[in-house]
Structure formats: structure tokens, C-alpha cells
Image (tube, grey):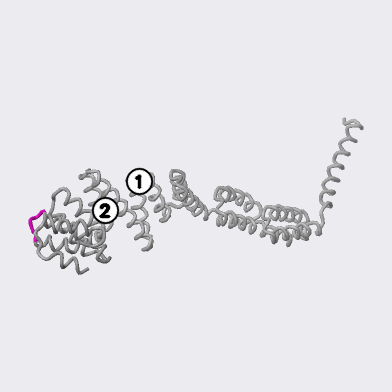
Amino acid sequence: MISKNIWATFVFALLFTGATSISYGQDYTYDDAADAFTEANEYAEANEFDAAIEKFVEAADIAATLGEQGEEVESRAKSQITRMSLQKLSMLANNREWEEAIAWVDRIEELDAQYGDGSAFERAQGGLPQFYLSWGNDLLQEEQNEEAVEMYEKAIELRENYTRAHYQLGLAHRRLGDLSASLDALDRSMELAEEQGESDDLSRARSQARDYLIYRGSEATDDERFDEAEEYLTRALGYDAESARLHYRLAELYNVTERFQEGLEHAQKGLEFETGGASDMARIYFELGVAYKGLGNESDACDAFINAAHGDYRSAAEHELEYELDCDGWEEQVGRR
């Protein structure tokens, strides 16, 4: 049997709980929700996104306690919450505050789960690969190459077929001197660009791969690592067989290793593909002259060195014409220029 004191305590607690619930419901009115919404709008107009979001959340939460009366304010506040969250994300991106922008995407997920329909988070998440790519680009510009690689790899984790991220990853690995990794990334970029019909990206990646191999090949030639130089330069042909500069470097390599027939062939191809003026063609004509000279063809060697007597190559070409070969009348032909 329940004693009178215990029963009285139970009834009091029940009444108190009910009174608190009713009091809570009566604490807020439509005006409270509307005031919070108005204040939130003022923050939004001032681009104070954090304060705006906080007030729109307050307006939505108050309106939710009002039942049917608060439905319109609640709906409008919720739509503003997700809109403000995306606007803040845009501001962070425009300011290139990549770390903050990426962290804010997690907050958008929370807000959208409670007040939205998932579309805001979907849009924000879709921008993450671009954020990581741009962050990587900024790091690369600051010569923080290893950190840039990390950002590009994160972009690729989120969007494997991201052509530009693979391309930039190739550049970052080049900065780090990793030829294999650089070419792997550039090759993947080319593959994706071709699949997606991105001709400019395809051409850009192909040029980077070619130029890196030419650089490494030329460096190896200067260091007399001739087998390595040939490997790099012949591999570059797979990226661009019509590069005048590449054929010039191959002619230079083959001439210095006394493989003059191959030097001649590449010098001729270099002249075929060169689109510059006489000064641009001079270096190729010089290698053409070296090849002809090595093959014992003095007449063609003379013609080649005469054509090479321009700009930076004039002095070396004139030395060949005057001291190394018996070239009649070369002074008049060179002097006319």
C-alpha cells in the first residue's frame, strides 16, 4: 500500500513535469521566430555567414516548436541555412583558404542532415577534388613539392578520372626529380584526356613528358652518359616524333658518339620540322654540317656550316669553314648577311 506522503510526491512530480513542458511551449511565439529570422537576414546581407547560420538555426528551431503556425518560417530558415553554408564555402575557396574550406564541408554535412535534403552536402562534396587540386597548385608554386603531391593524390582519390590532377601530379614529381612517377602521372593524364576528348589537356601533357625527357637526355649527353641519353631521347620520340628540338638533340648525341649517319638523319628531320627563322635553324644546320663532315662529305658540310653561320652559331660555323674544311667562297656568302 502506497503511503500518503509518497503518493503526494508522485503527483507533484507529474504535475511539475507537465507544467515545464507547457511552459517551454509557451516560451516562444511566432514573433520570436520571425525576429530571429530577420536578424539572420541582416547578418547574411553583411556576409557574416557564421552569425547568419547561427540565427537561421535558432529561427528554424523556434519555429519547429510552434506547429503549423511556424511551418513557413521553419521552411524558409532551413533553406537559408544550407544556402549560407554553401556561400561560406564559396568565400573560403575564393580566399584560397583550402584547409578551412575542406573542414567546412564536414560542417555542411551536419547542417544539411538536420536542416536540408542532402543536396547542399552533395554540391560541397563535389567541390572537394577541385579544392585539393587548387591547394596543391598553391603549394607547388611555393615549391612545397612533396606537400603538393599529397594534395594531388587526395584529389585523385576522390575523382580518379581527374585529368588535370594527374597532370599536376606529373609536374610535382618532375620537381622532385622522379622521372618514372612523373611520366606515369602524365601518361594517365593523356589517357584520360583522350578518353574525354580534351585535346588541349592531351597536348599539354604530351609536351611536358617530351620536354622532361629532352631535358634529361641533354643533361645525360653533357655528362657523357650516352647510353642513358639515348634512352631518354628515343623515349621522347614516343610523345612527339615531330619535335625539331628533339631531333636536334638526337643529332647532337649521335654526332658526339660518332654515329654520323644517324646524326645526319635526325638533323634532316629537325630541319623539316623547325618552324623558326634562320637563327633557330642554325644549331640544326651546325649538327648537319658535323654529320656530313664525319661522313666525309665536305661539299654538303660546307653548305650546312654556311647556313649555320647565324647568331650564337656563327663563330663556330666560321671556324669550321675557315680551318676545318676547304670551302671556296664561303666568306662572300656569309658576309652578305
Q: Earlier in the sequence, mark 1 or mark 2?
A: 1
- Relative horizontal placement of residue 217, taking residue 74 as reference (left or right): left
Please name the residue that numbered disc 2 is placed on. 236
Q: Nearer the viewer, residue 332 or 123?
A: 332
- Relative horizontal placement of residue 322, taking residue 104 as reference (left or right): left
Residue 284 on image: x %, y %: 21, 59
- Label 1: how many residues lie within 10 Å, few (<14), some (14-19) or many (20+)? some
Q: In the rendered structure, which amino acid carries the disc numbered 1?
A: Ala
- Please tell me which residue is depicted at 12% across the width and 55% down the height of the picture: 323
Please name the residue that numbered disc 1 is placed on. 181
- Can residue 75 be seen here? The reply is no
Which quadrant would residue 42 be assigned to in this image?
bottom right
Q: Main secondary structure of the magenta part?
A: loop
Q: Nearer the viewer, residue 29 or 280?
A: 280
Q: In the rendered structure, which amino acid carries the disc numbered 2?
A: Ala
- Please tell me which residue is depicted at 83% across the width and 42% down the height of the picture: 17
Q: Relative to residue 146, is residue 67 depicted above or below?
A: below
Contact flag, marks 1 and 2 (Cβ < 8 Å): no
